[in-house]
Amino acid sequence: SALPTVNIVEVGPRDGLQNEKGAAIPVELKVELINRLVKAGNTTVEAGSFVSPKWIPQMAGTADVLKRMEHIPGVQYPVLVPNKKGLEDLIGLLDTNSSNPPLTDEIAIFTAATDEFTRANLNCTIKESLERLRGVTKMALDRGLRIRGYVSVVIACPYAGRTDYKKVREVTQELIQMGCYEVSLGDTVGQGRPHEVGEMLEEVKKAVSVEKLAGHFHDTYGTGVSNVLTALQHGVRTIDSSVGGLGGCPYSPGATGNVATEDVLYALQESGYHVRGSVANAIDLEKMVDIGWWISEQLGRENASRVGRAIKAR
Ligand code: HMG
Ligand code: MG
């Protein structure tokens, strides 16, 4: 059929878990979360990060997660890489595990639209981060890895206030020119409102075709689902979301998790969009609700998905 397809990038195991306070989340729990998400129909699941464990302690075990989880052909398991060291560690792991399919064939690189946020998240300016990332992307492309890009604070910045959408456009364009097949635009703080998302997207679309853009909305102010629908109306077809609404960025004080995958799926059902390809291949909402409850209980946190709570109460 001619219905447009929406691709969901499930970021729960990375964005969702990176900010959990308290004890280290066991590798086995992360592995089970990823395996369950794939069984529920997800075909892109962010598996973790090769970042400094001093900066983000909860992502320290990502190499072990990649080694122990199931690898289903056709499923993408991107991992975040901030610099050459992270990429070298990943390539070292891939070299010692010549499994088929490989442990992963995709990295995600990240920078931001303000120097203030980039400094907090990566300890450098935007310009310096882009210079670093040029080396990273060259090495990754030589190795045959796919590269996804992220731009944070596309609407507002916790340190600099309102974001200049022209800066979002410039940084996005640079990431595409470096070889990212797609750039995900992050409302890191979750303050964005639908009209702002629309204005930001129209600015970025002046330089980058919309098929290469994804939307990444944190749900701090409750505008997550509205912002997703607005992004779809502006032509975006890839949406990042997190089961149970897990997460938050450690360098964005007060920000809550991503828009919950369950909430996005519920809003899109019977809406004129197909979620990920075909109806048969669609992500199973009931299974996602079960996973949202299971992982929330495991972590001892509230289930942040409105749909998850509503369906349980039925
Ligand atoms: P730095 O301190 O400037 O780095 O941090 P450095 O190069 O000076 O190295 C310091 C130490 O870290 C050294 O160890 C390095 O070996 C080590 P020491 O000699 O002190 O023992 N190191 C590493 N270890 C493991 N893996 C690495 C690595 N690199 C250096 N890759 C750095 C710079 C980039 C490392 C740091 O700032 C960092 O790791 N930042 C990552 C922050 C992060 O992961 N943030 C969350 C993800 S982004 C996000 O959530 C936003 C997103 O969801 C979209 C949105 O919502 O907007 C994507
Ligand atoms: Mg995020």
Image: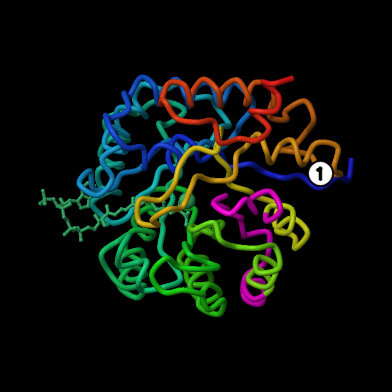
Q: Nearer the viewer, residue 87 or 213?
A: 213
Q: How many marks?
A: 1
Q: Is residue 213 left or right of residue 186?
A: right
Residue 19 horizontal/vertical position (percent): 36, 42
Residue at x-position 38% and y-position 52%: 140
Q: Observer-nearest residue: 114 or 169?
A: 114
Q: Is residue 129 above or below residue 15?
A: below
Q: What residue appears at the point 53 percent right and 78 percent down from the top-left corner? A: 164
Does the magenta run of residues contain 186? no
The residue drawn where x is 32% and y is 24% is 27
Hey, which residue is sitting farthest right in the picture?
A: 1
Q: Quadrant of residue 202?
A: bottom right
> Residue 117, position in %: x, y?
37, 66
Q: Nearer the viewer, residue 237 or 292?
A: 292
Is the residue marked by circle 1 packed among few (<14), some (14-19), or many (20+) residues within 10 Å? Answer: some
Q: Quadrant of the N terminus?
A: top right
Q: Is residue 210 magenta?
A: yes
| Label 1, ligand 2: CB separation under 8 Å | no
Mark 1: amino acid: Tyr
In percent of width and height, residue 261 lies at 62, 37
Say which element carries label 1: loop
- The C terminus lies in quadrant: top right
Which stretch appears magenta?
Answer: 203-227
Query: Which residue position is annotated with label 1?
Result: 273
Whether residue 60 sits left or right of residue 282 in the image: it is: left
Residue pictured at 25% horizontal, 43% vertical: 89
Residue 183 in the image: x percent, y percent?
A: 54, 59
